[in-house]
Image: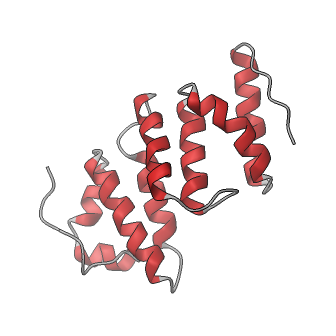
Amino acid sequence: MVAVTMTPACSREDTMNRAIAAEKEGRHEDALTLLRPMAADGNPAAAQLLGDMYVFGHGVAVDDAVAQSWYDVAARGGVANGRPEFGVAIELAARDGDSNCKHRATLWLQKAADRGNESARRILQNPADLARRGFETSKVDTAPLR
């Protein structure tokens, strides 16, 4: 278990770096312990990584609603234009043979587009591109987005 002590900005940066390292090394509980207080305080990078952990079930149960709540915190902190949602969509779509992943990927792609992510909008408007990238095509509204 990692002890968490929060002090000035350089310590917050160090804590974030330790959280990222813990997540990459598969020490999810340590990453969660470090990320939760920072995300709760509105740190957008911590909130984005915590959202990713809920999407992919790293140390927690998969929960898209909780993930979205952390992505909302990240957006309020300046993470722009549905970037977290777009990254999740692309990663889920790349998983072969899992129709649930393709469905979830398509939902996350729509969320990214709804937040103004132009790449997500372009993909949604092109059924051939959707299929090529591994997204569902049958349940997508491909009408031009706002």
Tell me which corner region of the image, top left, top right, bottom left or bottom right, holds residue 7.
top right
* Residue at x 56% of width, y 52% of height: 52
* Residue at x 46% of width, y 28% of height: 77
Task: Give the total number of marks visible in the rendering.
Answer: 0
| Above or below, comparing residue 78 to residue 69 in the picture | above
Tell me which corner region of the image, top left, top right, bottom left or bottom right, holds residue 130.
bottom left
Q: Residue furthest top?
A: 8
| Above or below, comparing residue 104 to residue 110 in the picture | below
Q: Residue furthest bottom?
A: 97
Tell me which corner region of the image, top left, top right, bottom left or bottom right, holds residue 31.
top right
Where residue 11 sits in the image (x, y, percent)?
76, 20
> Would you say 131 lies left or right of 44 here?
left
> Would you say 99 lies left or right of 36 here?
left
- Whether residue 50 is visible: yes
Q: Judge by depth and name the residue closer to the eye, 140 or 133.
A: 140
* Residue at x 42% of width, y 46% of height: 83
* Residue at x 85% of width, y 38% of height: 2
Where residue 100 sits in the image (x, y, percent)?
45, 78
- Whether residue 119 is visible: no
| Above or below, comparing residue 143 to residue 132 in the picture | above
| Above or below, comparing residue 38 to residue 93 in the picture | above
Q: Judge by depth and name the residue closer to the eye, 22 or 40.
A: 40
State which quarter of the image contains the N terminus. Answer: top right
Where residue 124 sits in the image (x, y, percent)?
25, 65
Where residue 39 sits in the image (x, y, percent)?
58, 33
Q: How is the image coloured?
A: secondary structure
Q: Judge by depth and name the residue closer to the eye, 111 or 94.
A: 111
> Would you say 39 lies left or right of 75 here?
right
